[in-house]
Amino acid sequence: VNSFISAFDDGESRTPSMILLSGNHDQYGDKGNALDFIHHPKIHKVLDEPQQFDLYEDVEVVCIPWIRNEKDYSAKVFSFLNDTAKCGGCETRLLLGHVNIIGCSIGTAGYVSAENYFSFGLPDLAKTKYNPTHMFFSHIHTRMQLGHNAMYLGALTQLRFHEDEGKKAGFHLLDPVTLKLEFVDLSHLASEYHSIKEENLSLYNIEKDYVRFYTDNPEKYKHLSNVYAMANPLAVDKNVETFREQLKSNDLNIDQFIKEFCKVKELKEPESATYL
């Protein structure tokens, strides 16, 4: 943090103000926020209410933070975009939001619906009186193009298996004059998540990255903090393996086989059955 602030101060005369937009993971309790611990005269924090900033002569931005425990969050946000925000003059009008956009993929959890908290329809945001020319969102970790002028920016680093695996992480630079958006890939620096086969573990840098795999011996890897070794669901005990071998035999006694199997697996033996 000190190195960051020093670099920020060194460029004070030519560095534009920084805006920190609060997300759900910044928040704790009813009112606590991790951004409360950051203080600098050139840093603007957007915590619990939408705010608007004039960045340059012809560029303005509206920021929508994650507003916690707000029953009427939708009305609050749209009231700002339609009634409070300045809606004219600037050629470039940016909308930044830490929000759920309805219809977007959220990995194995499916898709964002209107039932998800703090969710908005992209067309509804686009047609407000603020009339944004570009919309950039956070919250979902994946970089995702939502339209010609809207996208999820992704995250600085991968944060979990499933949703983030195999996807590049980094940040974007927007030229306020040309409006060209450039992605800066941080994959070589940030942690990545990989689902692998146990025998390929040595191919990965587990000091930097996180890996997971199935194994017959999870205890073997307990000392490795970046390794998630999961018990192999296909692993079988010796008795079941014996039964498998019996099934291959030409001398299989199916009645005896079922009786022994039910005893080992603590199952109730069927009273009658027809075997083919």
Image (cartoon, rainbow, N blue to C red):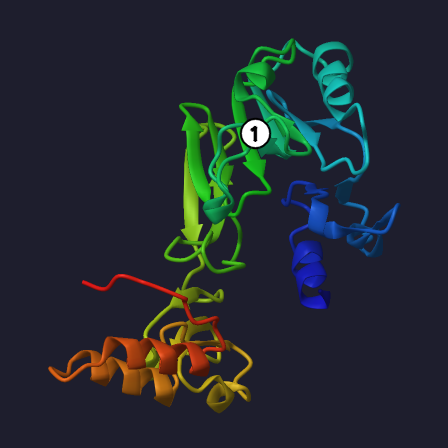
Q: Is residue 197 above or below residue 93?
A: below
In the rendered image, which residue does mark 1 sit on? 113
- The reply to whether residue 255 is visible in this rendering is yes
Residue 44: x, y in percent?
76, 41
Between 36 and 14, the residue placed more toward the observer is 36
Between 4 and 222, the residue placed more toward the observer is 222
Tell me what residue is drawn at x 43 percent, y 51 percent. 184
Asked whether, in this view, residue 144 is left or right of residue 62, the answer is left
Tell me what residue is drawn at x 36 percent, y 73 percent. 234
Q: Is residue 250 above or below residue 172?
A: below
Residue 126: x, y in percent?
56, 16
Between 74 and 40, the residue placed more toward the observer is 74
Asked whether, in this view, residue 30 is left or right of residue 92, the answer is right
Image quadrant in which the N terminus is located:
bottom right
Tell me what residue is drawn at x 33 percent, y 76 percent. 258
Asked whether, in this view, residue 4 is left or right of residue 51, the answer is left
- The reply to whether residue 235 is visible in this rendering is no
Q: Disc 1 residue type?
A: Ser
Residue 52: x, y in percent?
73, 25
Image quadrant in which the C terminus is located:
bottom left
